[in-house]
Image: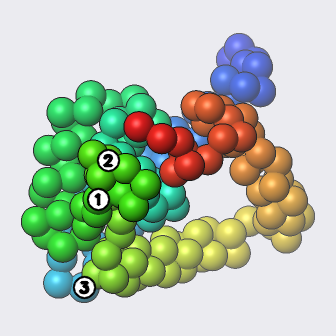
């Protein structure tokens, strides 16, 4: 990236993360027999897969979306067999979202497709560049955690 004005590393990082996010969404192949899902649905699925048991409100908070919009997405995803709504064992008024086996299978296919694309791209880089990227992964995960609302507190453990 050649810029006329040097940018702070935080600005460069934000730009590269956004670009990677967009490019990866474009590169992902939909699961067998499925169509490409809108990014908002993919984000809901990814979040619920990583943190089963979240409520619609918690998903909305994490994704910075309106609860009614998330509710609509969840209804569509449940209808399509990707999410399951379950009453909480701790509070019967609380509904938790859980991935289905269909969703986990689909996520595995998408992850494999993206993994292949990334592996091919990394092979085009120098071994040193690939190693620097691999070495940065733990720190990038730590940064993601620091940027997450209620950092350090697993969202699935919060009560309604």
Mark 3 near mark 1, Cβ–Cβ under 8 Å?
Answer: no
**Residue 126 or residue 76, whichever sits in front:** 76
Find the distance from the CA under tag 2 to the CA under tag 1: 6 Å
Q: Going 13% across and 57% down the picture, which residue do you hit?
A: 76
Quick one: label 3 or label 1, which is nearer the N terminus?
Answer: 3
Percent position of residue 37, x then y: 23, 60
Position of residue 64 in the picture relative to residue 132 (left or right): left
Percent position of residue 147, x then y: 65, 32
Quick one: label 2 or label 1, which is nearer the N terminus?
Answer: 1
Q: Which residue is mark 1?
A: 87
Instruction: Using the image, determine if residue 87 lies above or below residue 17.
Output: below
Percent position of residue 7, x then y: 73, 19
Instruction: Using the image, determine if residue 3 lies above or below residue 54.
Output: above
**Residue 26 or residue 91, whichever sits in front:** 91
Q: Going 58% across and 69% down the picture, which residue do you hit?
A: 118
**Residue 84 or residue 126, whichever sits in front:** 84
Mark 2 near mark 3, Cβ–Cβ under 8 Å?
Answer: no
Find the distance from the CA under tag 2 to the CA under tag 3: 33 Å
Dividing the picture into quadrants, the one containing residue 71 is top left
Nearer the observer: mark 2 or 3; the answer is 2
Q: Quadrant of the N terminus?
A: top right
Please identify the residue farthest to the top as the structure is shown: 5
* Any part of residue 142 in sight: yes
Q: Going 50% across and 57% down the picture, which residue do you hit?
A: 51
Mark 2, residues whose alpha carbon is within 10 Å: few (<14), some, or many (≥20)? Answer: some
Q: Which residue is mark 3?
A: 32
Nearer the observer: mark 3 or 1; the answer is 1
Instruction: Give the SS element for disc 1.
Output: strand
Q: Which residue is mark 2?
A: 94
Quick one: label 2 or label 3, which is nearer the N terminus?
Answer: 3
């Amino acid at each position: 990236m050649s810029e006329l004005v040097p940018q702070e590393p935080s600005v460069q990082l934000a730009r590269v993360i956004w670009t990677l996010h967009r490019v990866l969404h474009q590169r992902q192949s939909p699961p067998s027999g499925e169509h490409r899902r809108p990014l908002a649905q993919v984000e809901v699925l990814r979040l619920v897969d990583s943190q089963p048991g979240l409520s619609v409100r918690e998903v909305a908070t994490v994704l910075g979306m309106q609860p009614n919009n998330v509710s609509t997405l969840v209804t569509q995803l449940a209808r399509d067999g990707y999410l399951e709504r379950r009453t909480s064992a701790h509070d019967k008024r609380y509904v938790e979202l859980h991935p289905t086996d269909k969703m986990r299978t689909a996520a595995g296919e998408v992850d494999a497709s993206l993994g292949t694309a990334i592996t091919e791209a990394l092979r085009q880089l120098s071994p040193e560049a690939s190693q620097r990227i691999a070495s940065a992964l733990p720190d990038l995960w730590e940064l993601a955690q620091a940027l997450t609302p209620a950092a350090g507190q697993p969202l699935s453990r919060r009560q309604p």
